[in-house]
Image: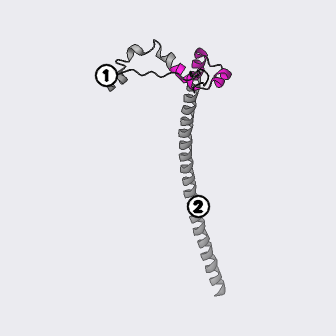
Amino acid sequence: MVSPDTGTTPPSHFTEVSLHPVESISDLHNGGSLHPYLTDDPASQQWEELMGILPPSLCLQAGCNPAHGRGAFLLLLALLILTCLALAILAVYLSVLQSESLRVLAHTLRVQEETLLKLRLASLNQWRRLNTSEARGLS
């Protein structure tokens, strides 16, 4: 936004982009001719760029100074990784538990089916005995 009074751009929380010439694409990957333009501490520069994305009001509320914020960010990242690991372990455990439960259920159903067949056979035998005893009594 250009100010109508002075014709200048007001300061914002976005950083200025500066372009540097490169000789080849490999210079971008290797840092070739760009190396003199980089600051001494790339991690600090990356952190400042990350903090530059956040709205200033949010940074003031959270107290985003680079030393404090970087530690909190790394702690939050470690907590996220541990949570993902715990969820993966829980998923594997529940999968094994479900598999074992299905195996036990299949075994129980087989035993019940065998029991029903035995009961049906015993019932048929009882009916035969009853029918033969009635036939003897009538004759």
Mark 1, mark 2: which one is toward the viewer? 1
Q: Could you tell me the amino acid type at mark 1?
A: Glu
Return the residue found at the far bottom: 139
Query: Overall secondary structure of the magenta stretch?
Result: helix
Residue located 58% across and 31% down the image: 83
Closer to the chain start, of discs 1 and 2, is 1
- Span shown in magenta: 46-74
Q: Distance between the residues labelled 1 and 2?
A: 83 Å
Which quadrant of the structure image shows residue 94?
top right
Towards the viewer: 69 or 119: 69
Label 1 residue SS: loop
User: Residue 32: where, in percent of width, then height?
Assistant: 34, 18
Q: What's the amino acid at mark 2?
A: Thr
Find the residue positioned furthest to the top: 40
Q: Which residue appears at 53% of the width and 39% of the height?
A: 92
* Contact between labelled residues 2 and 1, with CB atoms less than 8 Å apart: no
Q: In which quarter of the image is residue 134?
A: bottom right
Compared with 113, 16 (above or below) is: above
Q: Nearer the viewer, residue 22 or 119?
A: 22
- Rendered position, 120 above or below 130: above
Query: Residue under circle 2?
Result: 115
Which quarter of the figure is the N terminus placed in? top right
Give the label on residue 23, or none: 1
